[in-house]
Structure formats: C-alpha cells, structure tokens
C-alpha cells in the first residue's frame, strides 16, 4: 500500500502525463504513473494512431518504459481518465506478467477515486507463465 502523500504524488504525475496524451480520434486522454519497488516512477500517456489497433494505452506505455529501463518489480499504478475509466484487458494482462499483486487506483481528473484494489481483482483467473507447457528438453 501507499501513503496518502505517495498516492497524491502519483496522481499529479499521472494527471500531467494525461496532458501529453495523443488522442485526436477518441479525444479520450489517459495518464498513468507506475511506481517501482525501488521508488522510481514511470509515466505514460495513451498514443492513438489512424490505424486504430496500432495505438497504445497509457498503462502499457508506462510499463514498457519501466521494463525497458530494467525495472521488473512494481508497487502501485495510478490511472487518470476524464471519468474514471478502467484499464483495458490488454493492459491488465501486460501488467500481470510483472506484478500480479500490483495495487491500482483509478481516478478521474478531479482526483475522485473510482476504483482501487489489486490487479488480481481486475483480472481473475489470469493467464501466466504457469499456464505455459513445461519445457520437455527441446
């Protein structure tokens, strides 16, 4: 869990990241702030594309930035949207790879918390490495 000050700081960082979103098609800007176990924060904003499937959500932008910098363990994620919209299934699955016990807050731009809880609650029965077939010496 986080202190109220830590959560507030992550909210501000996610809100600032949201301002950098590139969302000319949907107009739905999202910002995310991901806290590592070492105390680093990685932010992300959604980036849309005219070819819709090529866009990327703010949550995965933050996650991929962190992973590309060598981070693999995460404590918390704050997501800020206009109306408190939840992370999509693809983001939930990508986060699961590294942090099934991640604590997540979803807030709107005014700072109202719409949801908080563990990633496990957002993605029950997740597919993970444990579901892959064991290597049979190949």
Image: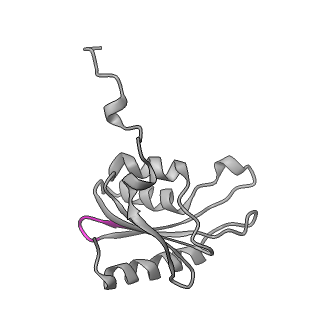
Q: Depth check: give the residue in front, 20 or 86.
A: 86
x then y, percent, for residue 64: 44, 55
Q: Is residue 19 above or below residue 100?
A: below
Looking at the picture, does residue 48 appear above or below residue 6?
above
Q: Quadrant of the N terminus?
A: bottom left
Q: Residue at x 28, y 80 (%)?
A: 3
Number of numbered discs: 0
Rendered image quadrant of residue 131? top left
Q: Is residue 75 visible?
A: yes
Segment tinted magenta in the rendering: 33-39
Q: Is residue 11 left or right of residue 118?
A: right
* Residue visible at 45% across and 62% down in the picture: 62
Is 49 located above or below residue 85 in the figure?
Answer: above
- Which quadrant holds the C terminus? top left
Relative vertical location of residue 19 with respect to residue 138 in this rendering, above or below? below
Taking the spot 55% from the left edge, 62% from the top edge, the residue there is 86
* Residue 38 sits inside the magenta stretch: yes
Q: Is residue 24 left or right of residue 133?
A: right
Q: Position of residue 98 (x, y in %)?
A: 34, 50
Q: Percent x, y for residue 87? A: 53, 59
Q: Horizontally, is 43 left or right of 19 in the view?
A: left
Residue 68 is at least partly visible in this image: no
What kind of colouring is applied to the model shown?
one colour
Magenta segment includes 125: no
In percent of the image, x 67 and y 59: which residue is there? 48
Residue 75 location (% of width, % of height): 30, 64
């Amino acid at each position: 869990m986080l202190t109220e000050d830590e959560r507030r700081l992550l909210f501000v960082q996610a809100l600032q990241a949201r301002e950098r979103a590139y969302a000319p098609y949907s107009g739905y800007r999202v910002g995310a702030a991901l806290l590592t176990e070492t105390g680093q924060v990685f932010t992300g904003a959604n980036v849309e594309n005219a070819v819709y499937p090529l866009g990327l959500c703010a949550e995965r932008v933050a996650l991929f930035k962190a992973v590309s910098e060598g981070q693999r363990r995460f404590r918390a994620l704050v997501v800020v949207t206009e109306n408190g919209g939840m992370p999509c299934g693809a983001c939930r699955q990508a986060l699961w790879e590294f942090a099934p016990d991640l604590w997540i807050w979803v807030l709107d731009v005014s700072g109202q918390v719409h949801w908080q809880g563990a990633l496990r609650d957002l993605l029950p029965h997740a597919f993970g490495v444990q579901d892959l077939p064991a290597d049979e010496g190949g």
